[in-house]
Amino acid sequence: QAPLVESGGGTVQAGDSLRLSCEASIGLFRDATMEWHRQAPGKQRERVAGISTSGYTNIADSVKGRFAISRDVSKNTVFLQMVSLKPEDTGIYYCRADRRFGRPDVWGQGTQVTVST
């Protein structure tokens, strides 16, 4: 099994909601700040949300009020709840494990989110 497996992407209309999931291996989940990044066509990848091992969360200003990150420790899974989606939210959403102690980061394969008008 891949260390990070994302799911939940899809094509929705503007104003709809989606919830992305990222299931991590136990070792990664306990050892890293888990993050969601996204990359829109022709743009740089940007960090949209993160949750630390202690549960502290932060959300990028560009999506604050619409996106929320959470986790289910029992399932080693991190979620990105997205509401009031806009066409500019379209992109590939990646899960990242920002590991402690200088260990290399791990990225998921990405899941496509497309928001139509």
Image (tube, helix red, strand yellow):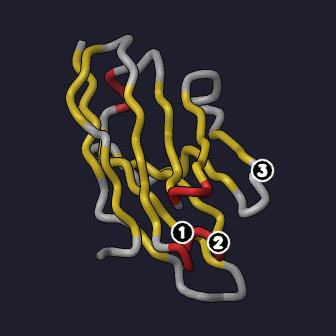
Q: Quadrant of the C terminus?
A: top left
Label 3 packing within 10 angstroms: few (<14), some (14-19), many (20+): few
Query: Residue at image x 58%, y 57%?
Result: 74
Label 1 packing within 10 angstroms: few (<14), some (14-19), many (20+): many
Label 2 packing within 10 angstroms: few (<14), some (14-19), many (20+): some
What residue is pinned by disc 3?
Answer: 56
What residue is pinned by disc 1?
Answer: 97
Q: Amino acid at mark 2?
A: Arg
Q: CA distance from mark 2 to mark 3?
A: 14 Å
- Residue 16 falls in which quadrant of the image? top left
Q: Amino acid at mark 1?
A: Ala
Q: Are marks 2 and 3 in contact (CB under 8 Å)?
A: no
Query: Residue at image x 44%, y 58%?
Result: 95
Q: CA distance from mark 3 to mark 1?
A: 15 Å
Secondary structure at badge 3 equals loop
Q: Amino acid at mark 3?
A: Tyr
In x, y percent, where is residue 1? 29, 76
Residue 60 vs 116, above or below: the answer is below
Q: Earlier in the sequence, mark 2 or mark 3?
A: 2
- Residue 115 falls in which quadrant of the image? top left
- Residue 1 in the figure: left or right of residue 98: left
In x, y percent, where is residue 64? 63, 28
Mark number for residue 30? Answer: 2
In x, y percent, where is residue 92? 30, 48
- Residue 5 in the figure: left or right of residue 64: left
Residue 28 vs 57, above or below: the answer is below
Query: Residue at image x 52%, y 78%?
Result: 105
Q: Earlier in the sequence, mark 1 or mark 2?
A: 2
In x, y percent, where is residue 93? 37, 48
Mark number for residue 85? Answer: none
Q: CA distance from mark 1 to mark 2?
A: 10 Å
Residue 9 vs 84, above or below: the answer is below
